[in-house]
Amino acid sequence: MLSHASWRIMFYIAMGYGGFSLIGTFFVYFPPSHPRPDGLTRWQEFKKLDFIGAGLFISGLAVFLYGLNSGGNTYPWNHAGTLAPLILGLFVFLAAFGYDFTMAKDPLFPWYLFRSFREFSALLMLVFVAGMVFFAASALNAQTILYLYTADPIKIGVYSIPSG
């Protein structure tokens, strides 16, 4: 019966879907051997990656998000346990862009892309704002269904499936 379903059934459905997708991808996806027309092998392309910029970006973002998560939960917002990760993470995150804009040979974030505002940067800002509107709306989805359609929690869950 549907009212006794737990999270496990959704986990098993997702596992089946993931397995089906993995097998389907294995049988129908054949990537090109040289995606870039520069004649380099995959190992040569891998060695040219900007590991310093990627490391700065990932570590700065992780430390900054830790500071956001600890603020108000683990520590108060004005505590050093919150402020230090926020400030340090922001500086390391911005250092990734500074490094890529100035010193990297093959940067992850090339300056010429960010400099072309109407062709690239404006689109990034538009996608960011649209994404924030989507997440705000999806947080209110269950409330909307509750007040407009039904108070049954099972139906609210079923109606919420399309929004992820």
Image: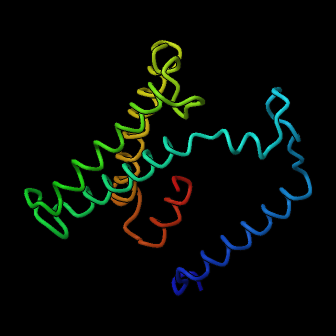
Colouring convention used in this rendered image of the protein: rainbow
Left or right? Give the position of 84 relative to 10: left
Q: Considering only vertical position in the picture, is 152 above or below 143?
A: below
At 45% across and 50% down in the image, what residue appears?
58
- 96 and 154: which one is in front? 96
At 61% across and 80% down in the image, what residue appears?
9
Left or right? Give the position of 84 relative to 90: left
- 2 and 51: which one is in front? 51
Q: Considering only vertical position in the picture, is 143 above or below 133?
A: below
Image x and y of residue 98, in percent:
39, 30
Image x and y of residue 125, in percent:
41, 27
- 116 and 151: which one is in front? 116
- 128 and 108: which one is in front? 108
Left or right? Give the position of 127 relative to 136: right
Identify the image quadrant of residue 134: top left
Image x and y of residue 141, in percent:
39, 53
Image x and y of residue 22, in percent:
79, 63
Left or right? Give the position of 42 relative to 91: right
Identify the image quadrant of residue 8: bottom right
At 83% across and 26% down in the image, what residue appears?
37
At 52% across and 31% down in the image, what residue appears?
104
Q: How many marks?
A: 0
Q: Which image quarter is the N terminus in?
A: bottom right
Q: Considering only vertical position in the picture, is 30 above or below 112?
A: below
